[in-house]
Amino acid sequence: MEKVIDYVALGRRIRICRKRKKLSQEKLGEVCSISTAHVGHIERGTRIPSIEALYQISKELDVSLDYLLFDSQNKIDAVFKSISAQLAGKDGDKVKVFISTVKALADKIDDL
């Protein structure tokens, strides 16, 4: 079965990832060398991004091109990236405690 790119859905995924990383359209455009207006058009699905722009966007948002284009990224990877994004900039000692807690839970997952 042939995959068809849904540009509105592509834009929606870009917007969600951009907001998750707390980036403005202006900042994303700046680091990807595209205008703020073009970022807005891509997010609304009214413009088709170039391969280069899409690559730069995926790199900046830490997501795969496959995810942006077809929403087929491994869901567990998405969860880990989301958690990582949430922990970015937090107190290092508290992050260590959080990770230790998660590891301890993972060790006991079969007992739950």
Image (cartoon, rainbow, N blue to C red):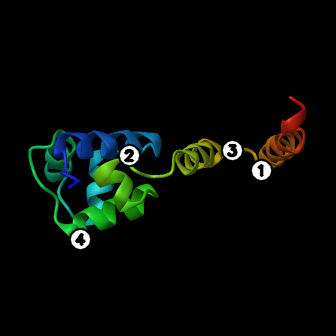
Which residue is tagged 1?
A: 92
Query: How far apart in space, not on screen, are marks 2 and 3 (Cα)?
Result: 19 Å
Where does the image place residue 73, in percent across and percent down from the top left?
45, 52
State the residue at coordinates (12%, 55%): 48
Where does the image place residue 28, in percent across and percent down from the top left?
32, 54
Three-letter code for the amino acid on which mark 1 is drawn: Gly
Q: Is residue 11 above or below residue 35?
A: above
Taking the image as drawn, is residue 31 in sight? no
Q: Are marks 3 and 1 in contact (CB under 8 Å)?
A: yes
Query: How far apart in space, not on screen, are marks 1 and 4 (Cα)?
Result: 35 Å
Query: How far apart in space, not on screen, are marks 2 and 1 (Cα)?
Result: 24 Å
In the picture, measured across the screen, residue 59 lies left or right of residue 69, that is right
What crowding class fits label 1: few (fewer than 14 Cα within 10 Å), some (14-19), or many (20 or more)? Answer: few
Query: How far apart in space, not on screen, are marks 3 and 1 (Cα)?
Result: 6 Å
All told, the count of numbered labels is: 4
State the residue at coordinates (83%, 43%): 106
Rendered-image quadrant of the C terminus: top right
Which residue is tagged 4?
A: 52
Image quadrant where residue 82 sits = top right
Query: Tag on residue 90?
Result: 3
Query: Tag on residue 18?
Result: 2
Three-letter code for the amino acid on which mark 2 is drawn: Arg
In the picture, measured across the screen, residue 94 lies left or right of residue 22, that is right
**Mark toward the start of the polypeptide (3 vs 4):** 4
Between residues 8 and 111, which one lies in front from this camera angle?
A: 111
Front position among marks 2 and 3: 2
Front position among marks 4 and 2: 4
SS of the residue under disc 2: helix
Q: Is residue 83 above or below residue 54?
A: above
SS of the residue under disc 4: helix
What crowding class fits label 4: few (fewer than 14 Cα within 10 Å), some (14-19), or many (20 or more)? Answer: few
Front position among marks 2 and 1: 2
